[in-house]
Structure formats: structure tokens, C-alpha cells
Amino acid sequence: MVKLDLADLAKYPFLPEAKSYVERLGIELRELFNDPDYSDILERAYERVVEALEHGYVRLGRDPHIEIVSFPAAIALVSFVGSDLLAQRYATAEAKRASRQLERDNNLELTVYISDAVFNWGLKIVRRETLDGRIEETPMVPVYTYLKYASRVSGSFWSLVSRRVENGYVHLPLRALIRLLEEAIKDYILERFSPPVGVELGYAEPLVARLSELVKKRLKPAEELLEAYRIGEESYPPCIRVMLGNLRAGKGLPHLARFTIVTFLRALGWDVDRVVELFSILPDFNERITRYQVEHIFGLRGSRTVYAPPSCATLKRGNLCYAGGDPICGKVKHPLQYVRVKVGGKAD
Amino acid sequence: MERLIKRMFRDYYSKAFSLNESLVSPIERREFGVQFFDGLMQRHLSFAAGEELRSFLTSKVPKGVYYSSACYENPAAKEMELKGWVCADLSFDIDVDHIPTKCKQEHDWWRCKNCGYEGRGMSPPRCPICGSERMERHTWICDKCQHEAKEHLYRLVDDFLMGDLGLSPKQLIITFSGHRGYHVRVVSDEYSRLDPESRGLLIEYILGLGVKELVLEEVSGRRRYRAYPLDELGWRGRVARLLYEVISGYSVEELLEIGLSEDAARFIVRNRVGILRQLEARRPSWSFIKVIGRRNFESLVEEARFRGAAIIDERVTRDVKRLLRLPGSLHGSTGMMVKPLSYSELEGFNPMEMPSPFERFGDLCIKITSKRTYKVTVGGYKYDPASNPVGRPLKLPAPLAIYLLLKGHAEVVGDGDCT
Ligand code: SF4
Ligand SMILES: [Zn+2]
Ligand SMILES: [Zn+2]
């Protein structure tokens, strides 16, 4: 049996033992947020999230007690902010911290215990004599567990072909097992984000507000691209703006221009209806035909290919590039990249 | 002809067909689909019980019947978002269409619908002349092909599913496809929750993709090989054992055929005993690679992979929203039954001797209309084009006649024309 002390619970605050530690103290979220005695815990919870946001990593604080209790508090804070991107970022950072600690501990028994106690993986340990006579202990995970998590980690290192597979189990070096656990821990945390009902934010209110601000500043560009409806035309590249201008003026558009507009707006999250409506301004507009064509380009008909917008090179060849002296155009190869740079402030 | 065939299919669905519900359970969560004789497809069907499905089949008489490997909250919903995908059984399709067999040169052919170019054997995905994907494909059932399909089925089931994955025969639902292959569905909650990417890793494993990288490593720009003992687990040991098979069993000619150079092939045959001893060692060394060279060794490894992999249709395994042929239904291009098989039945199963539900119709009067028919056995009845001339009315046992009609190589003639 693994003996866990407070320091272990601080490193691995998702353990059931850490959960019961918090429960035994009888600290409820409501009190945490509203009792000034707990301000150090709340402060650390806030820090955890900020660290995740700014460095993609959560450090291990000195006081185990605060580390353990601030973990569920941090999850609650993230839930209140209500940003999926923040949740992703936070879960990834916490999972990375746990896996670094596991690597440092380099303890097979503990790692296996976590896999089983938290995730119910049902690991097995094989003992084999190596060629030079040592006894080697190797953990084995069920094949389906391996497939589930290894498929998310890239690289041929994770190909099942390269592994020892035996009767439903995959032999794994400890480090590889820890890497898979990192994915599972991330999932575990992600599943726990839901705004607690009936809890007054109290002292947490300014913290949630500050986090929301931070998210806006740090993650906004990416989030905006996801919800691209909100991207204004001022962020479109010159070529698209000229095409849209011509369209609105009722001028005929060459095929490539129509194709570019439809694929570009689709990539920004427009739906078929909205695109069709845009074209309704044309004098030769025929709703049925336009809808058919748009749906085709959206990959909803025929070959089901979803078409990507043409690159700058293609547009230049088609005499549809209006880069002029635009400084961003000088740096990008694709109209969508233009938007990303304009909105996000950096080239990717 | 369509009338006659539909009548016989209807007869089957109304009298002989009975759905073994445990094979599609839970039936109320599955989506069903049918294809009619006019080619139209109807999807998003849902049935609460087998009897309901049977009366549907009896009244509509489709050419093919399918069910989803997936379970849905709402199988009848027309849009995926509303269907509510819950899970999908891990499924495999083994089909001779994807397995290279030499006999296909004799009995399979294809023609480009765009430019008319045609060829024999395994059909390319697109026309080599004009690039069109509109291809007409003609396939035939033959002994060797059926044998090959079963070989790959055994590899899939014995070596991978029951061997490496440790599944039990009870967790496998195996059916003969009704044509030239087999389907296997794995009944396991854990596997049915996997996403397509995870299934992709398993596909790679079963196809042995990456075996070359397993034995030939490139470490910081320098190439080196890794040798594995014969009793190693997974593909490590499998590739070692298969290399052993190839090196111990292949003649010089066979080695040339798989791409080795003359020198390398002769070297291997001449030094066979020594090389095999190296492979057998507990700490094996494959130093013969240094003599034959990397290229020749790669050919050996590829041959080993080819002997060990089960050739499955990747798309079927990856796709978690796919329809599979319903066990017990009829295959619309052969008239043969999609036959559920227990693991123990596999060994003795010969699809060509499988009793046909059309047996009871006795003989039918038909006329062969094509010069491209080949020897075949259906429902235990043998057919040979040499003794069945084109264009003359013939009396053939119903299972054979239906096969030839559905393959499009014959037409029905009046009973009076046959003597
Ligand atoms: S460089 Fe690209 S984005 Fe800029 S105008 Fe030309 S085509 Fe449009
Ligand atoms: Zn062609
Ligand atoms: Zn054949």
C-alpha cells in the first residue's frame, strides 16, 4: 500500500485523499469565498490560474495545506470566468505540473496507485528478469486505455506497433505511463468545471473580474477567431474588402472572387444563410442556384469536399490581390493568416 | 428479372429470415438503412424489435440491409446532431477487394465509365488514362479468393483480437459478408467508446504500419537496425518470427520475386542455416543485414509484414457512424446470406458450400448473356462456362441462377424455352 503524506496530496491534489482532506476540514466553497480567514487560500487559487494563463505551468507552492485546498477553489474560479479556453489552458497546466512531479518522484508504485485510484485503469505489473539477471518491473495498461490517450500525443514513439502488447495489455516504461496519465488528469480537471450554484462570489468577485480581464487580453484573439462572427470587416485583408465592395456595388464578380468570398467567410464561421443573403444584392441573384453553389463549396453537397480559401499566390495569379502597400500583406501568404495577424497581433 | 428476384427475396424475408436480436442488440438504439433494387438508399430507419424489421423487409424487399455499428439516442433522426451518438462497436471489414490475389487477373476486371479504358485484376481507384473515378468494377467469387479472405480473418481474430488484445470469442460477432469477405464486430464497452483517432492507432497495428521503423532506426542521422528475439511480444517478436519464416522457407526465385537482388537472394539461401541460428539466439544478431544491405533487408521486412498483417478496410474501422450488413440478410450482388458464424464454426465454414435459401425453388430457366463468366460454386452447385454456352436457354439450380442474374451476366427466359 502506498503511504501518502500531506506533501504528496499537495503535488497530486486530484487524489481522493486530497478531496477527503478538504472535506474533513469542513471548508465549504461558500466560506472560502466569504471568510477573510481564508484569504491566503483564495489568493493562491487565483495565482494558480494566473500562472497557468501566463506560463502554461503551475508551480508547487511551499505550504501543502494551501496547495491542497486552493486546487478546488481554483477550479471554481475558472468555472466562474466561464471561458472554455481558460479552462483548457488551466487543465493543461495543472496536468503538466502533476506529470512533472510524477517524473521527479520516479515512483512506480505511486504512479500505479494514482492510475488506479483516480482513473480506475486496472494496471498490472510484470516482473521480468533481464538478460543480465536483474528483475525489471514494468507497468502494463489495458490496450483500450493506451489507444484512448496515446492517440492524442503525437509522434511515432506512440505507435502501438513499437510496443510490447500482451493479452490485452501494453507494456510501458514509467515515463510513458506518466505521459498518458497527464492526458487523463487533464480530462479529469476539464470534467470538473461547472459553476457552483448558490455560491456567493464574495471576495472572489474581484478575482473573477481580474481573470476575465486577463483572459480577454491574453486569449482574446484566439477566442475571437473561434467566434469569428464578431470579426469586423476592418480586419479583412484588402483583397476581400475590394471583392465585398464590388459585390455590394452590384458589379459582376469573376468565379474565383465568388469562390474566395464564400470560402473565406465560411472559415470565419459564417453559415450558409448569411452568405446567401450577402449575394442577394447581385442583380442576377437566384436564391436556389446561389444556395446550391454555396452549399457545394461548404462541402454539404456533391463530393463533400470542404474547400479552403485560395492562397495569396492564387489570388495574385487571378489578379485579385490588392495588397498595395499594406504592411500585413507583406508578411502573409494567406488571407486568413492576414486576419489572424490583424486580430491577434502576431504572425503564427 | 427484377420481379423474379424480388419475389424470391420476399419469400426469404417472410419465411426463412429471423433476426437474432442479440447480434444487433440493443436494436432500438441502432440506425438501419436499406438499398433498393433501383439503387435508391433509405437511411435513418429505426425498429423496436426484430419482428417489426422483418415485416418492413417483407413489404419493401430491399437489395441490401444495413445497421449501424453505432448506438444513438435517436437513431431515426435525420441529422447527426440530433441523432445523439452514444458509442460505436469497434468493427472490421475484410474484403478480397482490398487483398491482392493473383487469380483476380483471371476473374476480376474493370472499365472506366468516362473513357472506356479497361483492365484485368484489382481495380485502381481511378482510371490510369483519364483519371476519372467513375469506374465499373466486375468481381467474381472464387475458391482461392475465399481462402485468402479467411486467412486474413484468422490473422485478425487469432493473432490480433484474441491474441494481442486478449478478447474472448464471445466478444466477437463474426459474419460472412455474403460476397468475398467477413465482418467482425467487437462487443466491448471500452473499445466502443474510442474515437476515430484511437481506432487509427489500432488500424496501424493490425496493418503493421511502422514495422520498418521498428527494426531500422535512425538515430541522429545514423541508421542502425534492432534485432528482436523470436519470443518477443507484439510486432517485435512477430516480425522476427516472420523473417524467420521467409528466410527459412523461400527459394532464390521467391526472394527475387519479393524484390531482393540476385546476390542477396543467393547469399541468404547459401547461408540459411547460419542466419537462422542468429535469429534464434536469445540475444539475436542480424548481422546478415550488413552483407545484403539495407534495401534488400527492407524488402524482407516488407514481406514479413505482408505475411503477418490482416488487411482490413481502414475506413470501416475508423468510421464511427458506418452502416454494416445485417446478419441474416441477403447480399444483393450474389444472393448469398450474410451469415453469422461462431468462432468454432469458422474452421469448417466454406462460403461456396453454404446452403442457399433459394434451394427450394429448384431450377430456373436463364440465358447467359456475357462471355465473362468464370467457374464458380454457389450453394454447393458448380458452374463452368465451358459447359454452359452463352445465349442458349439453360436450366440451372436457383442459387446459381440468382448469382449469375445478380452479377448481371444472365437474364431470365420463359420456362418453355428450357428443355
Ligand atoms: S497579399 Fe493576400 S491578403 Fe493581402 S491583398 Fe494580396 S491576396 Fe489579399
Ligand atoms: Zn478513363
Ligand atoms: Zn480469386
Image (cartoon, grey):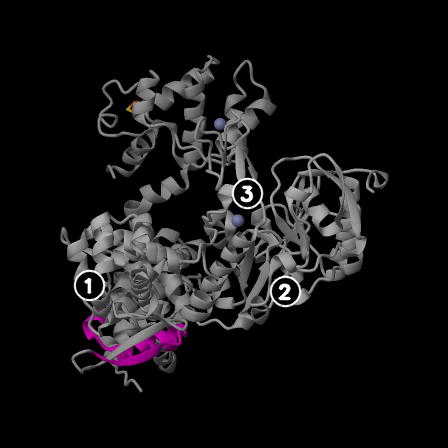
Give the chain letter at badge 2.
B
Label annotation for residue B107: 3
Q: Are marks 1 and 3 in contact (CB under 8 Å)?
A: no
Q: Of residues A306 and B273, which is closer to you in this image?
A: B273
Instruction: Give the residue type at disc 2.
Output: Leu
Q: Position of residue A173 (x, y in %)?
A: 25, 70
Report whether the residue tagged 3 is closer than 8 Å to ligand 3: yes
Q: Chain ID for label 3? A: B
Q: Nearer the viewer, mark 3 or mark 2?
A: 3
Toward the right, the furthest residue is B416
Q: x and y percent of residue A71 in the render?
A: 32, 68
Q: Which residue is mark 1?
A: B286
Residue to which mark 2 is pinned: B23
Towards the viewer: B94 or A310: B94
Residue range of the region highlighted in magenta in the rendering = A103-130
Looking at the picture, does residue A5 appear above or below residue A170?
below
Q: Earlier in the sequence, mark 3 or mark 2?
A: 2
Residue type indicated by callout 1: Trp
Q: Can residue B283 be seen here? A: yes
